[in-house]
Amino acid sequence: MAKIQWKLAKGKTWKQKLLQEHPTHGKIVDIPLRMQKRLGQGTMIIPKPLDVDAMMRKAKKGKLITQSQIRVMMAKAKNVTSACPLTTGIFVRIAAEAAEEDRRDGKIRITPYWRTIKDDGKLNEKFPGGAKAQAAKLRAEGFTLLPSKGKQPPRVKGFDAYLVKA
C-alpha cells in the first residue's frame, strides 16, 4: 500500500497551522451523543493546537507521553470530562510537522514530538519521516524498541515505565 502524504493548503506552513486561531479551539462543549459510548457523558474541551504542543513538550529527555495522556492532562487542566480525541490527534500531527519546520529553519529547541507515542507503545507512522525516523530518534535517546509485527510499527519496550506523570 502506498504511503499517503498529507499536504497543506497552498501557502500555509505547518507553523501557521499550529498558530492558527479558530472560534471552536479552546471551547468547552457537551460530549456529543455519538461520542458518549467511548468518552462518557459530561463536557469536553476542544483543544488549541498550541495547548497540545505544550503538553507534548512535557515529555523531557528519557520520558514518553501518549496521546491519551495529553487528553487527560488537558481535561484535568480545564476541569472537564475529556478532551476531543479527533482534534487532539490532528494537532499532535501539526505540532510534529511544525517542529520539523523549526528544525529546518535552524531552531535548536523544538517540540520533541518523537517522544509522543500511541497508547500501546507503538510509534506514529504519520510523524515526519514515519515510524522509521521516530525509531531512530528514540534509539538515539536510549530507548529500546521491539520489532514490528507485520505491517504494525515498532513499539517501545517497557514504555509505561517511561511515561510522564499525568
Image: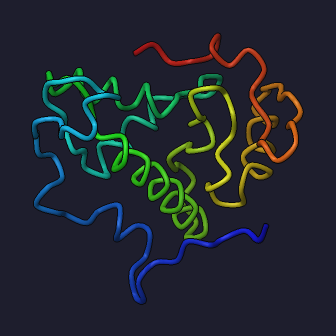
From what the image shows, is residue 93 above or below residue 62?
Answer: below
Q: How is the image coloured?
A: rainbow
Q: What residue do we see at 75% from left, 32% from top?
A: 141
Comparing 100 with 88, the one in front is 88
- Which quadrant, please, contains the C terminus? top left
Comparing 126 with 50, the one in front is 126
Q: What residue do we see at 63% from left, 26% from top?
A: 120
Tally of numbered discs: 0
Quadrant in the rendering for residue 84:
top left
From what the image shows, is residue 161 above or below residue 16?
Answer: above
Q: What residue do we see at 53% from left, 54% from top?
A: 96
In this rendering, position of residue 166 left or right of residue 7: left
From what the image shows, is residue 15 above or below residue 91?
Answer: below
- Which quadrant, please, contains the N terminus? bottom right
User: x, y (%) of residue 127?
Assistant: 62, 54
Q: What residue do we see at 14% from left, 25% from top?
A: 42
Quadrant in the rendering for residue 88:
top left
In this rendering, position of residue 159 left or right of residue 101: right
In this rendering, position of residue 72 left or right of residue 163: left
User: x, y (%) of residue 66?
Assistant: 52, 29
Quadrant in the rendering for residue 90:
bottom left
In this rendering, position of residue 142 left or right of residue 104: right
User: x, y (%) of residue 36?
Assistant: 25, 30
User: x, y (%) of residue 142?
Assistant: 80, 26
